[in-house]
Image: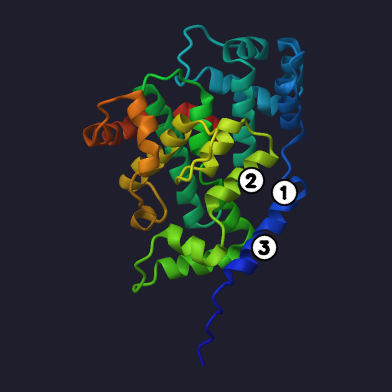
């Protein structure tokens, strides 16, 4: 006799997920050094020397910060050889974003199933794509764009690692030959909560900058009043571009059209923004990923 697994109850699963999230500070704690970096960057009285001293106490973080600072991502002509120099040229917020992004990637780990590996590949590509879009729209380039894109699907990674039974059931349903639903529809039906909401809650608990938290929480739409519409729209479009290129573990099952609510922000940046621009950006993404390889490696 074949045993049929019961379909997950969305209300019970949502409550289970929210329970885990309520304990995120205990089970998903950022390294002490990163917490100290966040505290310093939020302290208006803190100096560059204060931040430098904290980073220098951690050789691993020091190495990564210097590696990032000297990558083509920033394009500094002069080599950044000390933490003090990195703090000056990158700034408090940039250092904070880099440290937070690196620590989250390390916390969840990139090894695991084939799906997990592909999901991280999609996430890193989305980080590059978000920054590429910021450059295309002539915005001031900094790490917040990459970090927002990198972590946009952290909610999926959370589901995969902390409710694996439900997540495996979702994937089995998704890949069933009779299935015609998108990943997002299956997630809603089984979990009662979206990976975007989960990601927003996680980043909020880790004291990420609000604009990054909002971009992760709203990257599939439903922008709330007060959000940075531009950041949300860039991450949304970056996610779609990566999926259209096939850089996604669920490929066509993940595809969603551009949310019309994002269009005002995009047209506000470029009045004649068109589908041809999107096609050109898709073609450019592979080159951007290759160009930023040393920067990406520092996060891995």
What element does badge 3 sit on? Answer: helix
Whether the residues at callouts 3 and 1 have beta carbons within 8 Å, the answer is no
| Disc 1: CA contacts within 10 A as few (<14), some (14-19) or many (>=20) | some
Q: Dot 2: within a 10 Å radius of its alpha carbon, few (fewer than 14), some, or many (20 or more) residues? A: many
Closer mark to the observer between disc 3 and disc 1 = 3
Q: Which residue is mark 1?
A: 24
**162 and 57: which one is in front?**
162
For residue 284, side relative to residue 212 (left or right) = left
| Count of marks overlaid on the render | 3
- The image shows residue 82, relative to residue 25, as above or below, that is above
Q: Which mark is residue 148?
A: none
Residue extending farthest top: 78
Q: Position of residue 230 (x, y in %)?
A: 44, 30
The residues tagged by marks 2 and 1 sit, at their Cα atoms, a distance apart of 9 Å
The answer to the question of whether label 2 and label 1 lie on touching residues, with beta carbons closer than 8 A, is yes
Q: CA distance from mark 2 to mark 3?
A: 14 Å
Residue 146 is situated, as x and y percent measured from the top left of the image, at 49, 31
Crowding around mark 3 (Cα neighbors within 10 Å: few <14, some 14 to 19, many 20+) is some
* Image point (42%, 35%), residue name: 233
Along the polypeptide, which appears first: circle 3 or circle 1?
A: 3
Res. 14 in view: yes
Picture quadrant of residue 57: top right
Q: How is the image coloured?
A: rainbow
Q: In the rendered structure, which disc, 2 or 1, sits on the residue that comes first in sequence?
A: 1
SS assignment at label 1: helix
Q: How far separated are the C-alphas under marks 3 and 1?
A: 14 Å
Q: SS of the residue at dot 2?
A: helix
Residue 260 on image: x %, y % = 35, 42
Residue 112: which quarter of the image? bottom right
Q: Which residue is mark 3?
A: 15
Query: Where is mark 2, residue-wise?
Result: 201
């Amino acid at each position: 006799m074949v045993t049929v697994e019961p379909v997950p109850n969305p209300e019970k699963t949502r409550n289970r997920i929210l329970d885990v999230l309520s304990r995120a500070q205990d089970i998903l704690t950022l390294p002490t050094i990163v917490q100290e970096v966040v505290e310093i960057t939020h302290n208006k009285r803190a100096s560059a020397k204060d931040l430098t001293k904290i980073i220098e106490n951690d050789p691993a973080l020091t190495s990564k910060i210097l590696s990032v600072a000297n990558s083509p991502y920033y394009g500094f002509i002069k080599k950044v050889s000390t933490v003090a120099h990195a703090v000056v040229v990158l700034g408090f917020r940039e250092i904070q974003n880099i440290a937070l992004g690196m620590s989250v990637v390390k916390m969840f780990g990139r090894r695991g199933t084939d799906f997990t590996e592909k999901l991280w590949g999609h996430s890193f590509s989305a980080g590059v794509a978000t920054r590429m879009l910021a450059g295309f729209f002539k915005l001031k380039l900094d790490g917040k764009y990459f970090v927002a894109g990198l972590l946009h699907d952290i909610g999926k990674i959370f589901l995969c690692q902390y409710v694996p039974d439900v997540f495996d059931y979702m994937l089995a349903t998704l890949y069933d030959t009779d299935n015609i639903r998108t990943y997002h529809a299956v997630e809603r039906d089984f979990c009662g909560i979206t990976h975007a909401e989960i990601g927003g809650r996680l980043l909020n608990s880790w004291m990420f900058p609000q604009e990054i938290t909002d971009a992760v929480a709203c990257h599939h739409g439903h922008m709330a009043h007060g959000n940075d519409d531009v950041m949300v729209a860039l991450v949304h479009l970056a996610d779609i571009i990566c999926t259209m290129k096939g850089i996604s573990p669920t490929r066509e099952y993940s595809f969603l059209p551009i949310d019309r609510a994002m269009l005002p922000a995009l047209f506000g940046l470029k009045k004649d923004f068109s589908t041809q621009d999107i096609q050109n950006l898709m073609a450019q993404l592979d080159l951007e990923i290759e160009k930023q390889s040393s920067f990406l490696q520092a996060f891995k």
